Amino acid sequence: MAIILKQVVPWGRSADEYCHMFALNEADLSCQILGVGDGPASFNAELSPMGCNITSIDPIYAFTSQEIAQRVEETSQDMISQVWDDCEGFVWERFANPDDLGKARLKAMRLFLTDFERGKQEGRYVTASLPTLPFDDKRFDLALCSHLLFLYSEQLSSDFHLQSVQELCRVAREVRIFPLLDLARNKSLHIEPVSEYMTKLGYKVDICYVNYEFQRGGNHMMKISRVKSVGN
Ligand SMILES: C[S@@+](CC[C@H](N)C(=O)[O-])C[C@H]1O[C@@H](n2cnc3c(N)ncnc32)[C@H](O)[C@@H]1O
């Protein structure tokens, strides 16, 4: 049995999970980073005080802290009960069980919420949505997209994926996307079209193993980088 979601849900991961999902090293963390669809993740809240330069975008940043908290809490109950029904589809190393997972997700959200108002004033949380971003070309060194593209393969069209990845490559020198599985834990049907399209445009596309696996089999990210001939 797979997790079934009609729409993209706000559900946030920690900075440690981001570092593992995207194999972030010290050099990566000293870059200008764009977190795409960061939602209630605590990546920005945890790492900005340590001197990292992170801008997060998400459509939910248009809402108040209270509204976001309410939406995450509603999502949480449904997510946890679906994960209990599908336990064997996940690797229980980082979290003991679905309730422990729920606690970690709510902890991430609380960290995010304590930082949200200040971060908005500082321009670290920006209300924006793929496939069009309000940033200049090459504004960022690295764009990270966790649990949005590829995961929601059924809900987000092929055109949406192609346009979004191209837009990410416009605003950032390198793009990393995790996971490459959809909600049913099948390899996303958008992987090949995106790889072929971006390669044709002159980008280098790599599928890289990462030391993070929660969805069983989900331990690879896509890395897309500029090559000189792209002329950027
Ligand atoms: C499953 S959550 C993942 C949150 C975070 N990236 C993480 O991995 O912890 C997906 C997020 O994508 C956001 N989202 C939905 N549609 C989007 C779009 N068109 N552009 C950017 N973000 C979007 C949602 O609001 C939600 O916060």
Image (cartoon, rainbow, N blue to C red):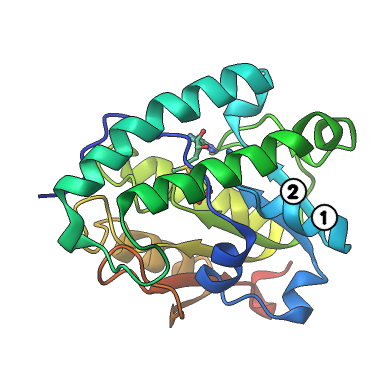
Q: Horizontal and vertical percent for residue 192?
A: 30, 66
Type of amino acid at the residue the image marks with label 2: Ala
Q: Is residue 119 visible?
A: yes
Q: Residue at x 34, y 39 (%)?
A: 156
Q: Residue furthest left?
A: 1
Q: Nearer the viewer, residue 200 or 212?
A: 212
Q: Horizontal and vertical percent for residue 19?
A: 61, 70
119 relative to 98 in the view: left or right: right
Q: Are marks 2 and 1 in contact (CB under 8 Å)?
A: yes
Quarter of the image where the C terminus is located: bottom right
Q: Residue at x 46, y 70 (%)?
A: 222
Q: Is 31 drawn above or below residue 38 in the view shown?
A: below
Residue 29 figure quarter: bottom right
Mark identifier at residue 45: 2
Type of amino acid at the residue the image marks with label 1: Ser
Q: Nearer the viewer, residue 187 or 69?
A: 69
Residue position for label 1: 48
177 relative to 174 in the view: left or right: left
Q: Horizontal and vertical percent for residue 85?
A: 15, 46
Q: Horizontal and vertical percent for residue 86?
A: 16, 52
Q: Is ligand 1 within 8 Å of the beta carbon of the residue shown at mark 1?
A: no
Alpha carbon separation for disc pair 2 and 1: 6 Å
Q: Is 81 drawn above or below residue 91 in the view shown?
A: above
Q: Nearer the viewer, residue 42 or 31?
A: 42
* Residue at disc 1, secondary structure: helix
* Residue at disc 2, secondary structure: helix
User: What is the count of numbered marks?
Assistant: 2
Residue 60 figure quarter: top right
223 relative to 4 in the view: left or right: right
Q: Is 186 drawn above or below residue 124 in the view shown?
A: below
